């Protein structure tokens, strides 16, 4: 059991008892999911080893995207897919951050507010890329990841975009490469981002709930060249499927406090913070996203709906640079990032074949008989160790 799950199992019921009547339903479901994850309350998964035939039973994960137990392995698989889609061009990372007075509003309107953040920041990139003074091309390709937390678990919403250095022009289909080391001017992106967000809030009827002072200050946009995509993808992969704080940062958790380590921005000195368990849970839950809200979004020629395949995109970029894509090189790149093998047998190391699922309910005689028939032998008491 991980430290975060232990905190929720020990203190979650008391938190629900105290705040349950005012707690959003999604927050209550996250608490219950984390508490029940990999316990009999979630049911069991039946496996059989393809090599030795040994049957195995593993308790199921809850599947909640905010549960730290369920996210292991997903980030690695996502990173492998994105590295296979790397393009032969320099990459940039753009970060869009809102002023501090706007954060409380966004926390109170997460679906509308976070959605507008994506629309306004992506719209700013597209608008400036199409300007003839910059790229002069109307179809850039990029993807963004929403983060809502700071290093002390405070609410700090911002979006990171990973962007290949250039764009296609729909009129002639040509690739317009960005200057090496420079993509778009952040001072020009900032007012466009702010104006588009303001328009979105006006259209949603929420403009009157926002402090007017936020429209008079600069909105922070940062752009940095990252070379190829690997460094930025590895950085983002730690956040795409993981929760607001990693298990490794938690130093101690008991009945009175949760102690975790952190570093301030632009500092390498490690600090510690101690929070009462209820405050730790509150800070954790403020990063729960609305049901169905997509925290990773793809735009332009990296969008799944784009008519160009990723292979065609690679080919056009290489053609613009004066040489063709090497199929052998593409195959080599793919081999560098093999897909995860999946669960393995703890006895012989063979691959486990999925056989079925037992839903969470008391086992009857038919269930017990089914378990015993898998592989022609009864399931041992240690069958689920190391699986799931």
Image (cartoon, helix red, strand yellow):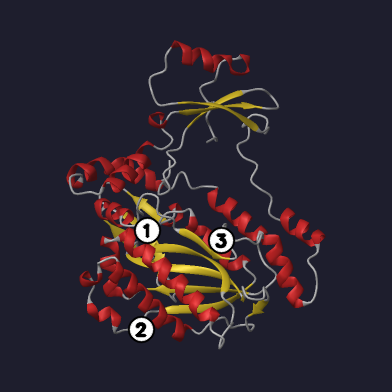
Q: Is residue 314 above or below residue 68?
A: below
Q: Is residue 29 above or below residue 78?
A: above
Q: CA distance from mark 3 to mark 2?
A: 30 Å
Q: Which tag, 1 or 2, sits closer to the chain's start?
A: 2
Which quarter of the figure is the N terminus placed in?
top left
Residue shown at 44% from the left, 58% from the top? 295
Q: Nearer the viewer, mark 1 or mark 2?
A: 2
Q: Which tag, 3 or 2, sits closer to the chain's start?
A: 2
Residue reaching furthest to the front: 171
The residue carrying mark 2 is 218
Query: Which quarter of the picture shows residue 245?
Result: bottom left
Q: Position of residue 146 (x, y in %)?
A: 43, 63
Q: Nearer the viewer, residue 301 or 19?
A: 301
Q: Nearer the viewer, residue 169 or 126?
A: 169
The residue carrying mark 1 is 260
Q: CA distance from mark 1 to mark 2?
A: 33 Å
Q: Which dot marks residue 303? A: 3
Answer few, some or many: residues within 10 Å of disc 1's Cα (few below 14, many 20 plus, some between 14 and 19).
many
Res 92 seen here: yes
Q: Position of residue 200 (x, y in %)?
A: 34, 70
SS assignment at label 1: strand
Side of 323 relative to 151 (left or right): right
Q: Nearer the viewer, mark 1 or mark 3?
A: 3
Answer few, some or many: residues within 10 Å of disc 2's Cα (few below 14, many 20 plus, some between 14 and 19).
few
SS assignment at label 2: loop
Residue shown at 55% from the left, 19% from the top? 379
SS assignment at label 3: loop
Q: Which tag, 1 or 3, sits closer to the chain's start?
A: 1
Q: Position of residue 31 (x, y in %)?
A: 32, 44
Residue shown at 65% from the left, 42% from the top? 341
Q: Position of residue 209 (x, y in %)?
A: 21, 69
């Amino acid at each position: 059991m991980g430290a975060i799950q232990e905190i929720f199992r020990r203190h979650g019921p008391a938190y629900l008892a105290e705040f349950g009547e005012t707690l959003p339903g999604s927050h209550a479901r996250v608490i219950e999911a984390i508490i029940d994850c990999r316990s009999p309350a979630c049911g069991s998964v039946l496996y059989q080893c393809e090599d030795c035939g040994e049957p195995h039973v593993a308790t199921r994960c809850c599947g909640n995207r905010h549960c730290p137990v369920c996210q292991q392995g997903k980030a690695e698989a996502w990173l492998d897919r994105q590295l296979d889609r790397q393009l032969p061009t320099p990459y940039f990372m753009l970060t869009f951050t809102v002023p501090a007075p706007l954060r409380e509003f966004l926390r109170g309107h997460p679906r509308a507010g976070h959605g507008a953040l994506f629309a306004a920041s992506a719209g700013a990139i597209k608008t400036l890329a199409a300007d003839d003074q910059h790229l002069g091309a109307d179809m850039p390709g990029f993807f963004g990841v929403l983060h809502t937390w700071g290093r002390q678990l405070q609410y700090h919403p911002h979006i990171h975009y990973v962007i290949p250095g250039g764009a296609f022009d729909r009129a002639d289909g040509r690739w317009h490469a960005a200057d090496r080391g420079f993509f778009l001017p952040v001072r020009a992106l900032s007012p466009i981002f702010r104006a588009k967000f303001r328009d979105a809030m006006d259209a949603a009827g929420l403009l009157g709930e926002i402090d007017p002072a936020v429209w008079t200050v600069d909105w922070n946009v940062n752009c940095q060249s990252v070379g190829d995509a690997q460094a930025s993808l590895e950085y983002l992969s730690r956040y795409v499927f993981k929760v607001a704080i990693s298990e490794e940062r938690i130093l101690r958790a008991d009945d009175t406090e949760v102690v975790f380590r952190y570093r301030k921005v632009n500092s390498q000195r490690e600090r510690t913070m101690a929070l009462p368990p209820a405050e730790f849970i509150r800070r954790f839950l403020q990063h729960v996203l609305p049901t169905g809200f997509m925290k990773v979004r793809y735009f332009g020629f990296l969008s799944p709906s784009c008519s160009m395949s990723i292979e065609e995109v690679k080919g056009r970029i290489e053609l613009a640079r004066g040489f063709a894509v090497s199929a052998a090189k593409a195959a080599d790149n793919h081999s560098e990032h093999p897909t995860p093998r999946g669960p393995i047998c703890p006895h012989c190391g063979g691959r486990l074949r999925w056989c079925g699922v037992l839903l969470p309910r008391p086992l009857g005689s038919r269930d017990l008989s089914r378990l015993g028939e898998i592989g022609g032998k009864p399931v041992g008491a240690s069958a689920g160790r190391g699986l799931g």
